[in-house]
């Protein structure tokens, strides 16, 4: 089956590189395919009692700098941007992936099996697992 609207979630990890490579190959199979590459950064916020603690501007700047590095890494991999759109968003990663897939009416989500989440993955479950569980469209998980 050929997909015409492919969304790949990209965080700069090795698994995300493999997912992007796969997405590029699939997009080339159909001349009319459009590939959307989504990078999401999630600024940590902490709830202490009834207060919400937001990180200082320096931490937000670090996330933005990292996002720029990730976009640079994407641009190094791609030579033709005619059917490719890169989107950067902030928020809850799984929710943003699913919301963006609905927004662009994607017919396939491609995601790496393990990203950069570390201990958070152990505690909360992996992003790829959550996307597979909640997506209303096919999800290709790349190892």
Image (cartoon, rainbow, N blue to C red):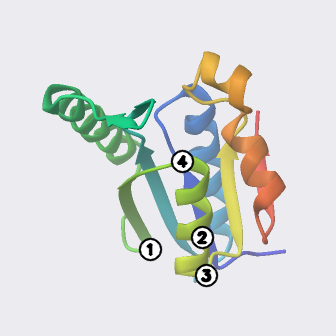
Q: Secondary structure at mark 2?
A: helix
Numbered tag placed on residue 93 in the rendering: 4
Q: Of circles 1 and 3, which is in front?
A: 3
- Which residue is disc 1 drawn over? 83
Residue for point 65% across, 79% down: 4
Residue for point 78% across, 71% down: 137
Q: Residues within 10 Å of mark 4 (few under 14, many from 20)?
A: some
Q: Is residue 80 visible?
A: no
Question: In the picture provided, is 90 more to the left or to the right than 4?
Answer: left
Image coordinates of residue 80 in percent, x first then y, are 38, 63
Mark positioned earlier in the residue sequence (4 or 3): 4
Task: Point out the residue furthest to the front here.
Answer: 50
Mark positioned earlier in the residue sequence (4 or 2): 4
Q: Is residue 142 visible?
A: yes
Quarter of image, res 50: top left
Q: Do the numbered discs 2 and 1 sit on residues whose CB atoms are within 8 Å? A: no
- Which residue is disc 2 drawn over? 101
Mark positioned earlier in the residue sequence (1 or 3): 1
Numbered tag placed on residue 105 in the rendering: 3
Mark positioned earlier in the residue sequence (1 or 4): 1
Residue for point 18% across, 28% down: 56
């Amino acid at each position: 089956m050929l997909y015409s609207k492919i969304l790949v979630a990209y965080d700069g990890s090795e698994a995300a590189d493999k997912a992007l490579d796969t997405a590029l190959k699939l997009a080339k199979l159909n001349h009319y395919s459009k590939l959307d590459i989504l990078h999401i950064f999630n600024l940590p916020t902490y709830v202490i009692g009834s207060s919400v603690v937001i990180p200082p501007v320096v931490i937000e700047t670090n996330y933005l700098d990292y996002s720029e590095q990730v976009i640079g890494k994407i641009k190094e991999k791609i030579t033709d941007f005619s059917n490719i759109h890169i989107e950067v968003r902030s928020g809850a990663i799984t929710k943003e992936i699913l919301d963006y897939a609905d927004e662009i009416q994607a017919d396939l989500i491609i995601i790496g099996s393990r990203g950069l989440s570390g201990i958070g993955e152990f505690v909360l479950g992996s992003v790829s697992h959550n996307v597979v569980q909640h997506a209303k469209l096919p999800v290709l998980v790349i190892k």
